Image (cartoon, rainbow, N blue to C red):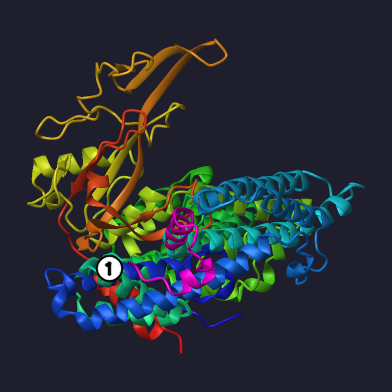
Amino acid sequence: MAGAYYFQWQNEFLCKTIYPMREQKLRDFLVYYMEVDIWAQYKGKDIAALQSDVQAYKKAQELAAITAYKSYSSLLNYFKTADVRGYYVKFKPADEAELAEINKLHQLFISSWPKDIRGERSFVQMQINYWVNHRNLLRDWIKSRKRRLDGMGLDHPKRPAEAAELALKESVSLPMAEQELDQLRAFDSTYDKIEKPKLEWYKLQKSDPNYKTPEADFLVHYSPTKAVTIQDIAIWRAEEYKSSLAKKNQFELLEEAYLRFKKEPKRFPYWLQYMVVHFSGMRYASAHGSWADPKDLLIKLRIAEVEKENKLIPNDLEVEKQCKEKIAQYESASGMNRPKLASATDKAWKDKVALHMLSVKANGPKTRRAGLAALKAEEVNYEYMSMTTDEALKKLESMKATFPKWAWKEIVKLTPLRVNYVADLNWETFTPEELAERNLPQHNDLRMVMDAWITKHIGAWRDEHGRTHELIVSRAVCNETAEHIQHIRGHLPPGGLTPKPNWYLKNEKEKILPGAYYVKPTSANEYTPGASILWLRFVTKQPDAWQVAKPIETKDGVGLIAKGFVGRKPKDKKDIPWVYKPGEITTRSRTYIDANKQKVNEQQWLRWIHEATVAEVAETADGPTIITYETALPDGDKGTSAVGIFKMPLSWHLSDGTEDAYNRSFVGYVPEGQVPVEHMKTMLDWNKIILK
C-alpha cells in the first residue's frame, strides 16, 4: 500500500481534493461553540466588576489597531506599486498575460484611489468584485479547455500546444489570480479595525484647520470614546481564541474537538461528532457516482469468467456430469469441493438453491444447462456477498497485478482503497494515455464489466451508508449531508428534497416515534438539535422531480406560500405584482415593460432549495443564533463551498424574506431511533482518528 491510513481525510492528496476547506471548517466548529460558551460566561455580569478584562481589552485593541494600520499601509503600498513582478517570482515561468492583468488592476489603484476614507472601502470592494469575475473567467476557460482536450485525439497536431497552455493556466495563471484576490481580501479586512478611526481623523482635520496630528499617529494611538461593553469583551475573547487556532493543523484541531466531545457528550451526540470528524470541509458536489460496492465488482468479474467457462462445456453429457456433481455437493454434509453456498443457513439463500436445483435435476438438457449456469452464478454471489468490506478490498488488492492501469485507477477511485492507494492529486481523472488504453479492443470485456459496475452503484451510497455507516462518499450536497446525519440518528429518510416534508409529516401523524413534528417555526423552541430545516425558493427554471415543492401543509394549516404575499398590492405603483398559481407545482408570473421598452413575461417555479440540520440553538454576544450542520450553496466562493458547521441569527431563520428573495423555511424533526453505537465505536476510534 502507498500509506497506512484509516480514513480518507488522513491522506494528504485526498484531503486536498475531497476536503478543500478542511481546517477552516474544523476551526469554525470550535470557534462557534466557544462563542456560545464565552457569552454564557459573561452574560449578565456588571462591567464595573470586570476592570481587569476591560483593561486587557483596551490594550488588545491598541495592539490590533497598530497591526491593522501596518497591514493597511503595507497593502496600500502594494496596490499602488505599478509593477509587481517581484511579488510573483515563485511562479516559474510567470504568465506574462496574467501579470499584465494584475498590473492593470494596480493602475486602477494608482489613478483612481479615493481622496479620503469615505470612499476607500467601497472602492476596494469594487475591485474585489472585478477581480472575482476575472478569476472566474480563468476557471471557466480551464474547464472549457479540459473538455476540449478530452474530446481531442492523442495524435491531434494542436494537442501538445493546447495541453501546455492548459497546464500554464492551471498551475500558474489561476494561482496568480488567487494570490491577488487573497491580497485584495486581506486589504478589505483591515478596514474592520481602521475604518472608524480613519473616519474620525478625517472629520477632525476637516473641522479644525489647526488639527495637525498625522493620520498614522492618530490611528496607532486611537482609543475609542465609546464605553466598553460586555459584548465587546465577549467578542474579543472569541477572536483571541480564533487566533490561537489559526496555525493548528487538522489533527491538532481534531484534538481540540475531542476534548469538547469528551467533556460534554450530551451536547455533542454521535451524529455531530461523526460529521465534524469525517465531513468537515468536504467539497460541495453530488455523492452520486463517488462509491461502488467492491464486493459487487468481484462478483461481476468472477461471473464473467464463469460464463466463459460455461460456454466451453463441450456437450450435454458434460453438462449432465457437472449437474450430478452439484447434486452430490449440495445433498452431502461434507466434501472437499463443496461450495460455500451449500452450507448457507439463511432461508433466502436456501430458497434460491432449491429453485436452481429444480432445473439442475430436470430431464431436459437445455433446462439443466440453464440451471447449472444459474447455480454457479448464485455460488459466486454468495461467496462474495458473505465477505466483509475489508475482505473484499484485500481480495481486490491481491488481484491488482491482473488489472490494467486504467482499471485499477477506477477501482481505487470508487472504493475505500483510495484511502491508502491515492498518491497524487489527479486520482479522479484519466490521463489521455489511460483513456486511450481503456478504449482498446482487448479491454472490451473488462470495460463492459467496469461500466456495468459503475452504473449500477451511481446512487447506491445511500443504502450502503444507511447499513454500514462507513465513510464511503467523496463529496456531498445539502440533502445528502442531512441524510448521512439521519442515518447516524437511526433513520433512513427518502433521498432528495421533495419527499422530506411528507416524511416528517407522516412521522408526526403516525406517531411512530412520539415527539415527531413538521412545522413552520415561529420561535427558537422548534429548532430541536437533529431536526431538518427545509428552505423554499422561487426559481426561473422548472425544478426536477427531487426538488419540486409539492402542495403540503403543517397540521396547523400553514402552507408553502406566505399569505401576505398572495394578492399583495405593491406600495409603489411602478412595482408589478406577482400572480400566484397553486397546483401540483406552484408557479408565479408577471408581465412588465423593461428598460428597453420590451414586453417581458416572467415566470418562476417554487422548489425546495436547501436542507440543513440543527446542531444547537444558542446565544452569543451577537444575539440568538442557530448553529447548523450543512453545506454552503454552490455559488459561494472558495471560502464557503463546503460541508461543515455554519451559523445564522435566529431572526434570519424565522423570516420568510421578501417576496422577490423568498426565504420561507419549515422544520421537520424525528427523535433518535436506534443509533448504531457499535459502528460509532469504529468510526469514532480516536486512536485511529488522531495520527501521531
Q: Name the residue type under label 1.
A: Asp
- The residue identified by callout 1 is 232
Vertical arrangement, residue 147 with respect to residue 41, above or below: above
Vertical arrangement, residue 428 with respect to residue 682, above or below: above
Task: Choose between 534 and 134: the one closer to the eye.
Answer: 134
Horizontal side of 347 relative to 388 (left or right) equals left
Q: Is residue 288 magenta?
A: no
Q: Is residue 200 magenta?
A: yes
Which segment is the magenta one? Answer: 197-224
Q: Residue furthest bottom?
A: 692
Q: Position of residue 382 (x, y in %)?
A: 42, 62
Please report the residue visible at 33 percent of the width from the left and 23 percent of the height from the top: 585
Q: Position of residue 143 (x, y in %)?
A: 68, 47
Horizontal side of 511 relative to 533 (left or right) equals left
Horizontal side of 527 relative to 338 (left or right) equals left
Residue 673 image-quadrant placement: bottom left
Residue 44 image-quadrant placement: bottom left
Q: Secondary structure at mark 1?
A: helix
Q: Residue furthest front?
A: 210
Q: Is residue 437 visible?
A: yes
